[in-house]
Image (cartoon, helix red, strand yellow):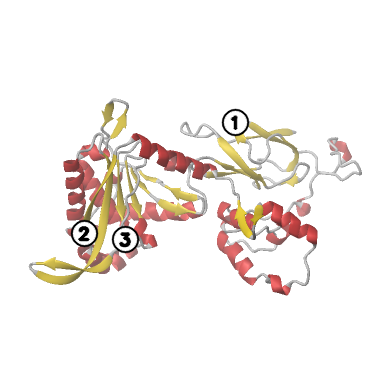
Amino acid sequence: MLIEVKVPQLSESVAEATLISWHKKQGEKVVRGENLIDIETDKVVLELPATHDGMLIEILKNDGATVKSDEIIAKIETEITSTTSNDSNLSLNPSAVEPIPEAERPVTKILMPAAKKIAEEQQLKQDEINLIMGTGRDGRITKEDIANHLKNKPQASDITSIPDSTLTKAANLMQLVSHDEKLEQRVPMTRLRMRIAERLVQSQSTAAILTTFNEVNMQAVIDLRTRYKDKFEKEHGVKLGFMSFFVKAVVAALKKFPVINASVDENDIIYHHYYDIGIAVASPRGLVVPILRNADQLTQAEIEKQITDFVTRAQNGKLTIDELSGGTFSITNGGVFGSMLSTPIINPPQSAILGIHATKERPVVENGQIVIRPMNYLALSYDHRIIDGREAVLSLVTIKEALEYPMSPLFES
């Protein structure tokens, strides 16, 4: 039976996708559930598994091709296997070949997107990859598995010789160009990186971006976390982090100043009466912003669970398109990388974004005395076309006050 391999249904906000790389060659056996190819949209990387056992008899779209939803990219014949002949032709006569025995099914290991990227950079061959023990779901190889393998791999000094042809091939793959003994590497942008670049330029060119700053004493939040973290984790099964306090403070400010939660549509201002907060998360493919839907209705435990889940799946390339679409306001935390101060760029069509930074002990004046307090500098970038300085400054003050006088997370139902 002939099976058509189609691009999965993409969301309405995603018009097209790019085929990254086929994991199987034309004429090779495939096993149901085995990942055939990674498909990259401007938001996520999707794995396209085989729906049947059989042979990949035809690839219609090659690596790098641009495709749309439901487009046919390959064909699988379920009643034949690959055969070898002098003229390299494929036998498509079911009676001329044997069905795939259970014991002879391929043992090709499946790599997570982050692991696949590292494997390609290190030019690992499939035979070598198949020797790696995968610790991911269903035995899939994670980036940690690749890293451990490379750590224990013999170094170049341990290898007696390398054929010239191998060196030539490696140089071609890496696209290294020598100019007066200087090396350069040309690497195409991923679809996600192109989308990030496009949206950032759009934000800078279409919005009147201004940033206001304030500082917040994080001592009250730190004391609450220290006091309740063990009980919180025992009761809810998740650690009590800082981000849930920031999300709660942001929601309080958005409710008080609705224009901060609004967006511009030509000559209209759209006020959103819901609070979908984007949380910027670093991933191997770049910065992604999954959305906390209806954040005003979530408890701190629910917020912490969702953020923890977002971070884990962002590392494994498992966030869905819907989870990365929409949002009325965003929070980005450069503090996790040590940033002291920055001016975040608005994520259009949103009109504002909060930048969080590293909490450091600093000297401050209280009641005429110099004391040491854990301070965090906050930055609110906003679209001055619809948000005046008054609303921006006061909304940031509201965030500051909510953090300096927080409620116990255990008071929530």
Label 3, secondary structure: give it.
Answer: loop
Q: Amino acid at mark 1?
A: Asp
For the residues labelled 3 and 1, the Cα–Cα distance comes to: 46 Å
> In the visual, does 409 lie left or right of 118?
left
Viewed as shown, does residue 40 lie left or right of 356? right
Q: What is the residue that sits farthest to the right in this orientation?
A: 86
Question: Which mark sits nearer the N-terminus, 2 or 1?
Answer: 1
Find disc 1 in the rendering and name its residue: 70
Q: Nearer the viewer, mark 3 or mark 2?
A: 3
In this view, the residue farthest toward the front is 180
Q: Where 308 sits versus 36, above or below?
A: below
Residue 261 lies, in percent from the top left, at 26, 39
Q: In the picture shown, does residue 159 fall above or below 357?
A: below
Task: Check disc 3 and report the residue beneath it.
Answer: 340
Q: Residue at x 31, y 62 (%)?
A: 358
In the displayed structure, does residue 206 sit left or right of residue 167? left
Residue holding disc 2: 216
Label located before the other in sequence (3 or 2): 2
Q: Earlier in the sequence, mark 3 or mark 1?
A: 1
Q: Nearer the viewer, mark 3 or mark 1?
A: 3
